[in-house]
Image (tube, helix red, strand yellow):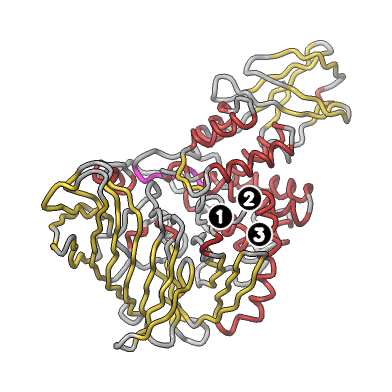
Amino acid sequence: MRKSLCWLLCALFFYSNAQERATRKDSLMGGFSKERTCYDVKHYTLNITLNPDQKFISGSNTINFDVLNATRRIQVDLFANMQVDSIIWNQQKLKHSREFNAVFVDFPNELTAETSQSIQFYYSGNPLIAKRAPWDGGFVFTKDKQDRPWIGVAVQGTGASLWMPIKDGQSDEPDTGIDIKVAVPNGLMNVSNGRFKGSFPQSNGYTRWDWEVTNPINSYDITLNVGHYIHWSDKLDDLDLDYYVLDYNRPKAEKQFAEVKPMLTCFQSKFGPYPFKEDGYKLVETSYLGMEHQSAVAYGNKYFKGYLGSDLSGTGVGLLFDFIIIHESGHEWFGNSITSRDIADMWIHEGFTQYSEMVYIECQFGYEKALLYGKGLQKNVTNDRPIIGDYGVNAEGSGDMYPKGALLLNTLRHALHDDALWWKWLAAYTAKFKHQIITTPMVIDFFNQETQKEWTSVFDQYLKYTRVPELQLRKKGKKLEVRWITDVPQLNLPIYVNINDKEVLLNPTNDWTTTNIKIKSLDDVTVDLKKFFITVSHQ
């Protein structure tokens, strides 16, 4: 969750920044070179010491991987401002070279395909500090209200390699997760993803806090949170719930976090079981607004309803719930469990997750309020550029991936006109692709298969073009004529309209079609634009 809406000075959809021409640096970060695709990461073991005063990290990341294709070189990513201290393989120090933020690691012998390998990557340095987290990536070194250190990190878009050596990107997640070990000065606590495995006093006035993630995890989801936290736990059936907030905020946090159980109940009823049960569900208070850190959701909404007390939809419905709790938790299904291979397809994360807000509203406050909220989101669509970005160059599409992506899904639901099938498909989608890395064509193919209809043209129009489908109506004699104006040559989008208070199905094409419907005036024909994200014009 990060991005920019002009009316909130880039507070929500930072992806709306104009794309610049791709560079070699972009290709190294976003591409799929042989040095990246030749190996598959199985597990990380991150073991670092964080010095808050010096804003300095030192330690190592052990990378266990399987060799897919024989190679003597692999690419590991680490920002150029961070020092590579040494890289060890089989007790040998390996040679390496840098190109921008890519570190190319050379082995003395060719690594044979279908073998398992491990390197220990030692590093140190002052990581990039965010200026406006989470809109830009980096560390946040701040103080709480009692002038005590409070530290966090948010890196989506910028890259996890700004603070740790890692195969950075969304195309390869560690199959068996990550162990996260962070040593901080005594008196401070670190909270990371997964299960707490214990705290261990060190000999230098530091305590190491150990966490274990057993599920695959996006690189940008890996996190740490350092502060004077207080912890309490709860359960929703057999799902463990854990909460970490600054000690003086517990009373209001307990009240605000009461929304977690109804939210998870709703999402599990619509999307299937919580996808990271083995690692539990956590909310962790942060000084920045929020982020979907897997099993350790970052919460910084300051205990307001809405989005820092405002309503993104402008309808009043957005003030009925805590936006950060709902949105960032929705990402556990969409983005964390189901991950796009390339960030050009980030609508798979953000469109579905913004739609999850409408799902929660429908569960808690009713269908009509969900539709009203969705209608309000329409004003946030800028149609500045396509939702899908350029592939292979670390390029996201338009920030419209949030509202327009959600409105595409809402449109598909109502065009399908079968709620039982819609919810069945959505649950089947999250089950089919649980813990998988996917692409836009995979989403489209699955929707087509499950509904036994062809929707490719609809996805293409909303995702690849800026134009919103225009439904044109005209009267010819006594008959209604209709057509679509779109960029795709033939839009296959059925539309339900009201004619004299009766619901009627239209199947327009991109050519004028004369229907058998008699009308006195075009004003007799109305379209519920809360259900369909289209424009309507009379000719």
On the image, which quarter does residue 237 sit in? bottom right
- Neighbourhood count class around disc 2 (C-alpha, 10 Å): few under 14, some 14–19, many 20 upward: some
Q: Mark 1 is on which residue type?
A: Pro
- How far apart are the alpha carbons under marks 1 and 2? 8 Å
Q: Residue 77 placed where, x, y %?
A: 28, 55
Above or below, comparing residue 431 to residue 294 in the picture: above
Q: Residue 273 placed where, x, y %?
A: 62, 54
Residue occupying the far front of the picture: 115
Point out which mark residue 272 bears: 2
Q: In this figure, which residue is indicated by the disc labeled 3?
A: 264
Front residue of this view, candidates 3 and 244: 244
> Which range is magenta?
393-400
Point out which mark residue 497 bears: none
Mark 3 secondary-structure assignment: helix
Q: Mark 2 is on which residue type?
A: Gly
Q: In this figure, which residue is indicated by the disc labeled 1?
A: 275
- Neighbourhood count class around disc 3 (C-alpha, 10 Å): few under 14, some 14–19, many 20 upward: many
Do tag 1 and tag 2 residues touch (Cβ < 8 Å)?
yes
On the image, which quarter does residue 188 sit in? bottom left
